[in-house]
Amino acid sequence: MDRFDRAILQELSHDGRMSWAQMADRVNLSASACQRRVQALTSRGIIDKFTIRLNEKAQGHHVKAFVAVNIERQNVTAAEVFREYVQSEPRIQAGHMLSGDVDYLLEVVARDLEALGQFIEDELLSFPAVKDASSSIVLKIVKPFQDAIGPV
């Protein structure tokens, strides 16, 4: 990967819908060269997919939190039911199974603090596999995940 590929990835991370001509102007290549490079980055698996970023507040989600969840690992079936729930629940934007003191770290959005508390108490803690859950409220996002293109 050279400086042009890195520049293309940077531009795509800011605006994935820009035209080939716009990209060409920004990275100092021809439009066809930009298109070929994006196709090559995609076939090499460096670009996994193109997606959109939704405005959470416009959707009524005014609170974001990270919820640390510990589960009962001995109950394999209950743990699998919990994982399936994490994958299907739209309020859980991301879920990571971790090593260490916390089993899962969930990125959760909610309408307000009351809705977040209700979600944790009434839904997460109701799973037989869940032993405990604690949350940390996001005060400010200083670098959105979508803007991270990783080390290039």
Image (cartoon, grey):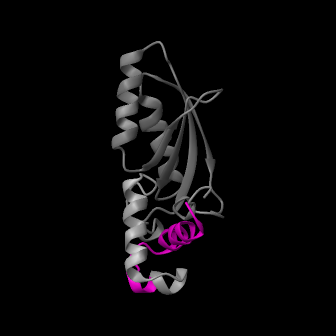
Q: Residue at x 36, y 18 (%)?
A: 77
Indicate yes or no whether the magenta region holds residue 5.
yes
Indicate yes or no whether the magenta region holds residue 79.
no
Using the rendered image of the protein, determine whether residue 14 is visible from the camera's viewpoint.
yes
37 and 116: which is toward the camera: 37
92 and 31: which is toward the camera: 31
Magenta residues, as a range? 1-22
113 and 148: which is toward the camera: 148
57 over 120 or under it: above or below: below
Image coordinates of residue 31 in percent, x first then y, are 40, 82
Using the rendered image of the protein, determine whether residue 52 is visible from the camera's viewpoint.
no
Image coordinates of residue 126 in percent, x first then y, are 42, 29
15 and 25: which is toward the camera: 25
Q: Is residue 98 left or right of residue 94?
A: right
Image coordinates of residue 121 in percent, x first then y, are 49, 37
How many numbered markers are drawn? 0
Pick the quarter of the image with the C terminus: bottom right
